[in-house]
Image (tube, grey):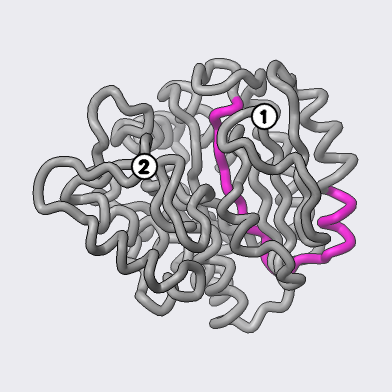
């Protein structure tokens, strides 16, 4: 069964300035690589649809949602925090990014595709229930997980996050919710400075030191993620796919390469095949060196 690919042109209209690393060219680079590799021809492509208010309210506080809509500018840039800004197109991009993951869940649960990759921005694993941060406005993967729980009546959803930054927002939203297992690897100490302390039983954090290479990345996942995921037996695997741990990405200090992303993707696929009828919904998070981002996404797909 084919892999779905969800994106939307309007996600490229969100622009925080030409010096900002989270730039529209990220999606262009991915698209160009998929065309050059021939992958674009075998993907089932879908345009994203905007997230609904009800879907956002399952994830974020009402006052927070209202504040984001109220902050959306008609011109120029409005800074939500020190590194997260909105231009006149950002709100729609954020709606489409979150809506893509919910649509991806619908597609795999309806059997229209087996797996989905969402090539969208704004990214989404840093926003907590009540605040934006880290280039993100809405928690996209959380929107998708709640879509699976509330609209498709799943009982066990696993979210795995291999971005170089801790998925603090996803942990904040699902901490203590036994229906969701959240597993995260990340550089530590590093932004946002979370993930190394005690947490609830449904959270599996693997902080890794700077300069971690593929062998130690794999060893941490084998020791911590895989046993927890096996015991949880998820009915759906969701992925916060961040590629900023690549050795060529100067936003961080990890030393992963494309074969490491291939390896973790194959492990996720194996788990999904055994527990979730192969169902995977993956969404783009970090990755700021355009060449390595495009290559890594292609390997992941």
Q: Can residue 277 be seen in this view?
A: no
User: Does dot 2 land on a helix, a strand or a loop?
Assistant: strand
Q: Quadrant of the N terminus?
A: bottom right
The quadrant holding residue 26 is top left
- Between 131 and 112, the one lying in front of the other is 131
Q: In which quarter of the image is the C terminus?
A: top right
User: Does dot 1 land on a helix, a strand or a loop?
Assistant: strand
- The residue pinned by badge 2 equals 81
The structure residue drawn at horizontal position 57% and vertical position 81%, both measured from the top left corner, is 150
The range drawn in magenta is 226-245
**Vertically, is 31 above or below 179?**
above
- The residue pinned by badge 1 equals 187
Residue 64 placement (x, y as % from top left): 39, 64
Residue 78 placement (x, y as % from top left): 22, 44
- Between 210 and 47, the one lying in front of the other is 210
Residue 4 placement (x, y as % from top left): 48, 57
The structure residue drawn at horizontal position 67% and vertical position 29%, both measured from the top left corner, is 187
- Between 10 and 275, the one lying in front of the other is 10
Mark 2 is surrounded, within 10 Å at the Cα level, by few (under 14), some (14 to 19) or many (20 or more) other residues, namely few
């Amino acid at each position: 069964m084919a892999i779905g690919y969800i994106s939307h042109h309007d996600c490229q209209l969100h622009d925080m300035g030409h010096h900002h690393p989270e730039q529209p060219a990220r999606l262009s680079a991915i698209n160009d690589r998929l065309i050059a590799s021939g992958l674009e021809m075998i993907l089932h492509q879908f345009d994203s649809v905007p997230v609904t208010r009800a879907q956002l309210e399952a994830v974020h506080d009402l006052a927070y949602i209202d504040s984001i809509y109220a902050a959306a500018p008609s011109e120029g840039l409005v800074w939500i925090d020190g590194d997260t800004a909105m231009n006149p197109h950002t709100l729609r991009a954020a709606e489409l990014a979150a809506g893509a993951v919910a649509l991806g869940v619908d597609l795999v649960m309806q059997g229209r595709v087996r797996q989905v990759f969402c090539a969208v921005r704004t990214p989404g694993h840093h926003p907590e229930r009540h605040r934006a941060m880290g280039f993100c406005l809405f928690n996209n993967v959380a929107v998708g997980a709640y879509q699976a729980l509330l609209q498709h009546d799943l009982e066990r959803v696993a979210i795995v996050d291999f971005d170089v930054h801790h998925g603090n927002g996803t942990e904040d939203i699902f901490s203590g919710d036994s229906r969701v297992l959240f597993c995260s690897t990340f550089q530590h100490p590093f932004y946002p400075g979370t993930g190394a302390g005690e947490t609830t039983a449904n959270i599996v954090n693997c902080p890794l030191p700077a300069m971690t290479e593929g062998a130690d990345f794999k060893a941490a996942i084998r020791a911590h993620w895989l046993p927890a995921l096996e015991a949880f037996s998820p009915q759906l695997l969701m992925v916060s796919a961040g590629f900023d741990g690549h050795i060529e990405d100067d936003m961080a200090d990890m030393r992963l390469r494309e074969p490491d992303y291939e390896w973790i993707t194959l492990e996720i696929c194996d788990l999904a095949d055994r527990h979730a009828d192969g169902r995977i919904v993956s969404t783009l998070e970090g990755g700021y060196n355009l060449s390595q981002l495009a290559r890594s996404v292609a390997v992941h797909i």
